[in-house]
Image (spheres, rainbow, N blue to C red):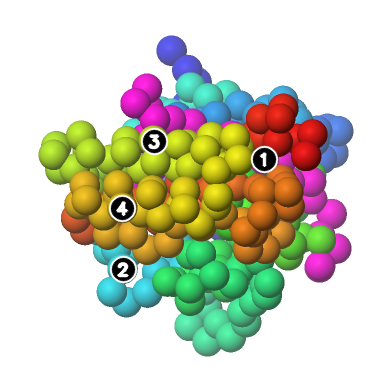
Amino acid sequence: MAKRVNTVHTVEDLREIVADWRAEGHLVGLVATMGALHEGHTSLIGIALEHASRVIVSIFVNPTQFAPNEDFAAYPRDTAGDNLKVAKSGAHLIYAPNNEQMYASDFSTQIFVGGVSDGLCGAARPHFFSGVATVVAKLFLQAMPDITVFGEKDYQQLLVVKRMVRDLDLPIEIVHGPIVRESDGLALSSRNAYLSEAERAVAPLLNRVISDIASDVGEGRAVAESLEAGRVRLDSTGFLVDYLELRGAENLAPITDIAERPARVFVAAHLGSTRLIDNVAINPSTEQRRT
Ligand code: AMP
């Protein structure tokens, strides 16, 4: 059986343990999560363990990245399940601060990362990325890891965190974690638990549509036409599309011409009351690459 993993709730306790690790010469990794862990999260822990000899998993459902009409109260929480999964994953410590620990009653600072937070999820959820950037900056400064792993599932978030780290000269290496999917293509997400049986059956279409767009565009089909065909498929299957776009993979600049690679297809869509996001890379055909 996997060994129990220690959980700390305060910055003081966290820093004491990290200081001991550093004195012993360890490299420290951090995987930031909102809990309700699944194999997407544990894959990031596995990657962190390849880069660091001690790995912290933070679990904090961050209220400032939810708008009042969003699912903060309903967001799945599973402390017992999370403890087991972290223990099995081989990580060394859970950091689970409470709200008071993270946000003083007169908390007044916000980090806003421009550019990469424009459009896509930043358009529909304007509060979201400054909530993420602020809490991630706090977690970085609390734990002071050498490396951290963020999932490509939340690709725009990954770029926002990378831009913040570069702009503020934070001495932390950011490693990308590839998207972990169900066998039918649906990207794992804590929010998949909200889907009804009927919605769950339809949900994999989201990935099929963007994968088809990626291969069509990769083979030279016009971008606008491909996106429109994808949107029609999603609309006619009960998805309410928030965005479906092709963007540059490095800075999320809008792309209309496949020559401006590397690119990814990004989608967010509501299925019933659940908002799902996904993205895939475009791998241009050899033919396209030559042109
Ligand atoms: P969350 O708990 O949803 O805030 O996610 C915590 C981290 O796990 C983020 O870096 C996410 O991008 C990553 N993550 C979530 N789902 C997946 C997945 N299916 N595959 C890979 N990484 C994921």
Q: Nearer the viewer, mark 3 or mark 4?
A: 4
Dot 4 crowding, Cα within 10 Å, few <14, some 14–19, many 20+: few
Residue 268, percent across and down?
Answer: 40, 56
188 sits left or right of 177 in the view? left
Type of amino acid under label 2: Glu
Q: Which residue is mark 1?
A: 176
Closer to the chain start, of discs 1 and 4, is 1
Q: Is residue 180 magenta?
A: yes
Q: Residue at x 28, y 74 (%)?
A: 69
Q: Residue at x 52, y 78 (%)?
A: 104
Closer to the chain start, of discs 3 and 4, is 3
- Res 70 label: 2
Residue 291 visible in the picture: yes
Residue 48 visible in the picture: no
User: Disc 4 and disc 2: Cα gap in Å?
Assistant: 27 Å
User: Disc 3 and disc 1: Cα gap in Å?
Assistant: 23 Å
Closer to the chain start, of discs 2 and 1, is 2
Please name the predominant secondary structure of the magenta segment in the image: loop
**Viewer-proximal residue among 250 and 95:** 250
Q: Residue at x 84, y 54 (%)?
A: 171
Q: Which residue is mark 4?
A: 232
User: Disc 2 and disc 1: Cα gap in Å?
Assistant: 27 Å
Q: Which residue is mark 3?
A: 208
Toward the top, the furthest residue is 1
